[in-house]
Image (spheres, grey):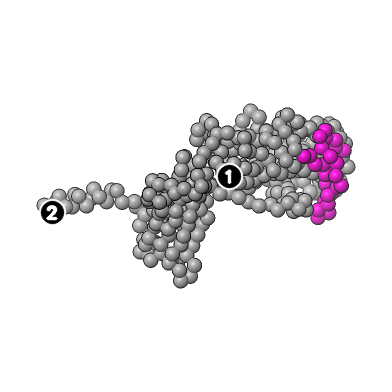
């Protein structure tokens, strides 16, 4: 009889998550409710909820629950000191994440509600609210930064029609572009190269999402035409070109007063309500072809150039009066 009891306990142990640790001995409780924001905050029953347990920046373990008939979940026995927590909900193949939370001193209860959405493969509610194209120059090289603030104005999460491995957003690049780099925390898992440029592979939740990336391409003449496709309607476009004595002309764009920031001067052009049928063409003239005597000492490796450019971009956007806000709801923490 005793042997059968030992065997039964061993079998049951196989079904217990190996998430032991100090947090399992505490008095903290995290509870919440999963609501479908597409369906007027209807409770979502029977979806998996994961509580990730973090120590500093490291994952220490996780606990799992299933929502009840009212979409509720609860995790108890949590340590209220020394740990932070993040809740993940998977719904229709999309992962939704809470903010990282911790117990205030003396508190033992945290409420972490989570909104999820129905999914759609239609991009009818997508457009770019603000786009910024910023050009800088080294002799023979054009350095480009793009900032695009996407809007999903619908009440559904936009997903790829090709399933989990497909792309959701397209970012066309000019011919000859190289050294492509996302600068705002997007990982290799989330982007892919395409024939037209690059693609983003994660779902796009209702609201806004911003993307910041850089690339470069070479030129051999003082005259260059930069052409690129427009993949989505753009409500407002700012083009800023470092003023190195060059000339610029662009159909469909209006020349504004130059913009100055920290002793740097930018030529400034704007466009409104651009569509994919318009495209974007910049005619550049009088480009620098060789390094002058004062420029040699300032030539730095490409990665450092991108960092400097990135810092400059934030300043330029602030000078334009547009707050650079970061939103990453629905992505892994």
Name the residue at 70% across, 46% down: 306
Q: Residue furthest left?
A: 1
- Upstream in sequence: badge 2 or badge 1: 2
Q: Position of residue 302 (x, y in %)?
A: 70, 43
Q: Residue furthest bottom?
A: 106
Q: Position of residue 294 (x, y in %)?
A: 85, 48
Which residue in the structure is indicated by mark 1?
Answer: 206
Q: Which mark is residue 2?
A: 2
From which residue to which does the magenta span run? 247-272
Q: In which image quadrant can residue 222 be found? A: top right
User: In the image, 93: left or right of 129?
Assistant: left
Q: Which mark is residue 29?
A: none
Q: Nearer the viewer, mark 2 or mark 1?
A: 1
Residue 63 or residue 278, whichever sits in front: 278
Q: Position of residue 254 (x, y in %)?
A: 84, 39
- Indicate whether residue 269 is drawn in magenta: yes
Residue 98 or residue 19, whichever sits in front: 98
- Indicate whether residue 275 is drawn in magenta: no
């Amino acid at each position: 009889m005793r042997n059968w009891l030992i065997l039964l306990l061993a079998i049951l142990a196989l079904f217990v998550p190996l998430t032991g640790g100090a947090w399992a001995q505490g008095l903290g409780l995290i509870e919440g409710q999963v609501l479908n924001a597409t369906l007027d905050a209807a409770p979502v029953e029977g979806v998996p909820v994961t509580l990730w347990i973090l120590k500093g920046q490291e994952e220490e373990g996780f606990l799992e629950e299933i929502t009840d008939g009212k979409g509720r979940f609860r995790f108890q026995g949590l340590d209220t000191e020394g740990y932070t927590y993040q809740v993940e909900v998977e719904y229709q193949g999309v992962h939704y994440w809470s903010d990282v939370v911790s117990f205030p001193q003396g508190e033992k209860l945290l409420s972490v509600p989570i909104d999820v959405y129905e999914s759609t493969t239609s991009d009818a509610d997508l457009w770019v609210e603000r786009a910024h194209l910023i050009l800088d120059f080294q002799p023979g090289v054009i350095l480009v930064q793009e900032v695009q603030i996407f809007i999903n104005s619908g009440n559904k999460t936009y997903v790829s029609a090709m399933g989990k491995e497909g792309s959701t957003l397209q970012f066309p690049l000019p011919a000859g572009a190289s050294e492509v780099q996302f600068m705002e925390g997007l990982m290799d898992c989330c982007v892919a190269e395409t024939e037209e440029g690059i693609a983003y592979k994660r779902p796009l939740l209702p609201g806004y999402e911003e993307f910041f990336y850089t690339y470069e391409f070479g030129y051999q003449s003082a005259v260059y035409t930069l052409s690129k496709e427009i993949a989505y309607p753009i409500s407002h476009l700012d083009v800023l070109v470092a003023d190195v004595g060059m000339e610029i002309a662009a159909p469909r764009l209006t020349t504004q007063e130059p913009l100055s920031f920290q002793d740097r001067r930018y030529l400034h052009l704007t466009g409104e309500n651009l569509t994919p049928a318009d495209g974007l063409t910049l005619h550049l003239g009088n480009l620098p072809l060789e390094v002058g005597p004062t420029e040699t000492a300032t030539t730095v490796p490409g990665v450092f150039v991108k960092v400097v450019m990135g810092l400059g971009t934030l300043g330029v956007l602030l000078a334009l009066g547009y707050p650079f806000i970061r939103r990453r709801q629905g992505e892994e923490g």
